[in-house]
Every structure is written in C-alpha cells, then in structure tokens.
Amino acid sequence: MNSIRNPDLSVTIGKIQLKNPVMVASGTFGFGEEYDDFFDLHQLGAILSKGISLKPMMGNPPPRIFETEGGILNSIGLQNPGFQNFINNKLPYYKKIKTHLIINFFGHTQREYIDLARRFDGVPGISGLEMNISCPNVKRGGIVFGSDPKMVYKLVREVRKVTKLTLIIKLSPNVTDIALIAKSVEEGGADAVSLINTIKAMAVNIHSRKPELGNMIGGLSGPAIKPIALRMVWEVSQRVKIPVIGMGGIMKAEDAIEFILVGASAIQIGTANLINPRTGVDVINGIKKYLIQNKIESVQKLTGLFKTY
C-alpha cells in the first residue's frame, strides 16, 4: 500500500486503468500535438480526441467562438477530418504518447454510430470510445439522440454489440432529466458516462444587431456552467452504478475535487486548456496535494465523499 506521502491516483473506467483521474476533454485539446511543447502529455490519465465522424465535416460558418462572462460560446460544428483521414494522419502521433487514447465519435443515424464503433474496435492504440449523443438524428426529424431514453437505450445497446472497447457515453445537459438518460445508457451496456456537454446558448451584438456566432446558437462552457454540471454529476451518480466522469468549468484542482466529492470517478478538462495549456498537470498535482493534506491514501476513496446536511 502506498504511504500518504505518495497517494494512489489510479482509477478504473471499464477496462481502462488510468494512472490518474485527469483527462483532457474532446474538442479543446486539438489532436494533442498542439500541446506537445507545454508539457509531457504522458502525465495525463487519458486524452480524448476531437469528435470523429464517418466522413469529413467542414463545421459551421464563422464566427465560431465568442468569449462571454465566465465562459466561452462555441459553434465549431464538429469539424473533423473523418475516420479514414484520422487513422492515416492523426493516430500515428498518439501512438508515441504513453497514456490512454479515447476516441470521441458521433453520427447522425444509428447506422453511422454502429459503423464507426465497429471500425475503431480493431484499431491498435485505442483504449476506449466516448460516444457523443448530443447530435440530431436526421431520420427522426432532428431529435437529439440523447434526449430520448428509449432511443438512447437502443443506440447504446446496438453499439455495444460491435465493440469490445470501453464504451463511455457523453451526456447532453439539454434534457429534462439527465439521470433518467444516464440510467438508460447504463441499461444499454455502457461502461461509463461523461457529463456534461455544453449548454445551448447565444449572444447578441447590440451594434450590428446580429448574433455573435455565425450559427446563431452555440454551446456554453467554462466556469459559468460549473454549478449546473456539479448538480448533474451528483444526480447521475445517485442513479447509476457505472463510473461517472465529470466535466464542466473545471479550471483548477479545487474544481476537480468538487466533482470527485459528488461522485465522479474521473474528470475532464475542457475550456481551461485554452487559457492555461498546463491545467491538466496543475490539476493532477493539486489533487495529489489535497490527498496528502487530508491523509487520504487513494483518490478512489475520495469519490462520493460528499456530506449532506
């Protein structure tokens, strides 16, 4: 057993044994290479790729990013090179990093999700999949996959059949009852859930009288959404037995510890990467310091240590 001077930071998510609970979220870490000059990426528990679709996507019209009070609005539109280009040109770089790679992926039909999961399943160097269910189902009139418990259960169940990789489902906060969605995901066979994705939002320029984003509506992330994310992580952790990965406004170690206390087994850092590229390492060190100061021998014992009145 490790001494309190060297607490155990390892956590298990499905089949993945992470060296620590700190991951970098999809979409804010590029394809990894952009951060190579700032720190050794192998220090991270895992890296989440940008969202990958079956075919390349150009994304939304500019402007795509707008800074607002306590956060960032983005409307990137899931721009990505597509599966084959990613495998040929991006994956070789990840294989040099001594940490886990988890692929974030999405589709606009159930068939696209299944096809992608099957293709990634046999690719060396990939530890797991994070399925983004915040996308509109084009065959169901644009209804978001993650907003319908029955639809998401069927989707997860079918994807689970085609992959042996650890399967994490990224939940949308833009629903009435996120814990109900999480329960459906668990029953469908997911290994873990990650939450929250961005919150639908917009901003207006009073001088041009036009929206600040080219797509009008975008996703809000950053410190402004942390209280909402914390509440949702706590609600979900009360309803499911599978690991919960928390995210939403984590800027420092104290934020990450809050998420762990309310039930998260691991966390993801998103917007903070754009402000301080070394946030991931700072958070890892901060969690370790907290454990030492509070004489807690492992981060796993911190999960759910939240006290209610």
Image: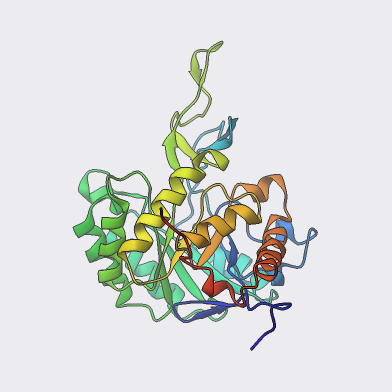
- In depth, the one of 47 and 308 nearer the eye is 308
The correct choice, above or below, for 281 with respect to 221 in the image is: below
Q: Which residue lies furthest to the top in this view?
A: 207
Which one is in front, 43 or 214?
Answer: 43
**Rendered location of residue 247, percent (x, y):** 51, 54
Q: Position of residue 147 (x, y in %)?
A: 27, 50
Residue at the far front in the pictured view: 309
Give the residue at x 58% y 59%: 257
Report which quarter residue 241 is drawn in: bottom left
Colour setting = rainbow
Q: Is residue 25 visible?
A: no
Count of numbered badges drawn on the protein: 0
Residue 71 visible in the shown view = yes
Q: In this view, does 103 lie above or below 151?
A: below
- Identity of the residue furthest to the bottom in this view: 1
23 horizontally vs 187: left or right: right
Q: Which residue lies furthest to the right in this view?
A: 37
Residue 49 rendering spot, x and y as whole percentages: 56, 62
Q: Of residues 53 and 199, which is closer to you in this image?
A: 199
Q: In the rendered image, which quarter is residue 3 located in?
A: bottom right
Task: Decide: is 129 above or below 63.
Answer: below
Q: Residue at x 23, y 50 (%)?
A: 139
Q: What residue is at 64 percent from the left and 89 percent from the top? A: 1
How far across and how far down the image is residue 18, in percent?
58, 76
